[in-house]
Image (tube, rainbow, N blue to C red):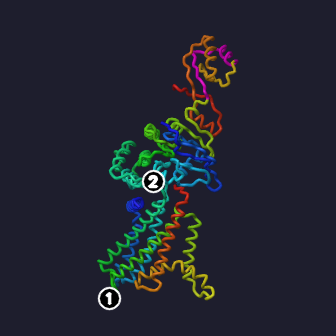
Amino acid sequence: MMLDNPIIECINLNKSYGRIRALSNLNLTVHQGESFGLLGENGAGKSSLVRLLMGFTFPSSGQLRIFDDANLGCARQRIGYLPEQPQFDRQFSAVQYLSYLGKLAGVPGEELRQRIADLLELVGLSAAADRHIGTYSKGMTQRVGIAAALIHKPALLILDEPSAGLDPGGQWDIRNILARLRAEGVTMLLCSHQLVEVEDLCDTVGILRRGELVRSGAVSDLLNLANLVEIVADEISAATMIRLQAMELGTFDVDGNCLVVPAAASQRVLQTLLEEGARIISMNPLRRSLQDVYLQVSRGVPTKVPTRSITR
Amino acid sequence: MRSIFTITGHTISEHLRSWQFLAELLPAAAIVAIFFKYPSDKGTYNEFAAIIGAYLVLQAMLTTALIITSATKARSYAVLARLTNRWPFYVGKLLAAILLVFATYALLLAYLLPTRLLTFAPDQNPWLYIAVGSGAMLLNVVTISAITALAMPLISHSTVRLTILALLALSVFSYSVADVPTQLRFLIAPFNALTFPMLFTYQLAHNPDYQSWTLLALTTNLLYLLIALLLARRFFSRRELLLA
């Protein structure tokens, strides 16, 4: 459940590397319990923001507050961080490495042992717990990364490309783990190229382009922006088409016996179809895919006629 | 403190598991073989102090460089993400490097003393010489390790690194300059003075007699250590970490 109190606040945040501007006047808020997806092409500034949040780099100007605290060092104790393509000491087992990170996070002995066992169970690594990480597959290493991020029961998870480079099965597993965490109410900032992952896991999305936040909002709002309806009839005659075209519906698309029209005009269109003797097979509100929104915002590609209905 | 010791322990374990410890063990074994085991004459304490004193300084530089370089990898993000500040990470790594060099020295002593490959003159009190000599050599190890760490890319930016290297080079070079007119000696003196505390400490390991310069040299050596630590703390805390 999303609450009002902000967990991450970026206020006019700027970050430059020499003459290259990585983030430009970024204003972003992530609330408690919210799952925020950050999208953007390579070099858009996603990883720059993550490094700033984790205190690995410093803002050129602007403010950054986590847990209402400008001292990110203190806040870090409550953050679980999964770097992009996490790397670990290959000579250690998952148990040894998690134990090391747990001790650094101040998790006491017996609790740490239990926590490691629970996390390895959660990420499906119990059977390989004592094997050296060097023998793990990419997907297994990614799971160790997720377990490492959760070792101290963080209130905020920052995940940088959690399923990058994984096969579809691995992506599915990671998504399931994150969905469970989301259901438990963990606040998440998820940077990803996987639009399906973001669409499934996030309540809110921000799209970065060349360091600027060009679009943000609730996923449902972004996807329903078109406010269109898909009507499928058994047959649409030429005479019906002529009548519909004369109605000046604005957005209007026909694909065989399938019509896409603005929701506001759907009643008029239905009436026309019925008057022309067409049998209505289905009528569904449509929404755009996140990919449509993303391409429109990040590349300026015009919105195509929506292709998915909500009841797919 | 707990974080520091946790990082130190893990770093030593990582060093041993990755076989990087051979960087300490092989040179130490070579030194024992070349200078103590196979020569027909037994090694004297003065030879020991001269050879091991120099070796430990080089070893401190190598081990510290290896450990800090290992820390300049993306895997350090997972560790740094757990710490409220970077200081325990730096000290933990430095302490690991120092302890590894200390352990190498302890191994050398543990081998050379019981096998009587290291001998003392009749007027030399073995335990006094070992105690004072070890103290002096290990003080140099600590200072050199701290300066080496400070000069690593993870800790300082290039301007600082180049300055440290230039000062060290000029200081070493200043000792080799001969026939300098008296009027120009003031130009060389500061560079002589830079490495003087370490060289004097090295000298002290040979001959553990208290001299008028001893206290000043040891104090300056400790001051160098303190300055190196403080500078590292300042630079590292402000360093932008873009690890790969």
Q: Amino acid at mark 2?
A: Arg
Residue at which label 2 appears: B82
Question: Where is residue A235, by image quadrant?
Answer: top right
Q: Is residue A58 positioned above or below A154 on the image?
A: below
Q: Amino acid at mark 1?
A: Pro
Q: Which is nearer the N-term, disc 1 or disc 2? A: 2
Residue at which label 1 appears: B122
10 Å neighbourhood of mark 1: few (<14), some, or many (≥20)? Answer: few
Q: Which residues are magenta?
A: A226-246
Badge 2 element = loop
Badge 1 element = loop
Towards the viewer: B135 or A283: B135
Q: Residue at x 47, y 77 (%)?
A: B219
Q: Chain of mark 2?
A: B
Q: Position of residue A59 (x, y in %)?
A: 59, 53
Q: Position of residue A287 (x, y in %)?
A: 57, 29
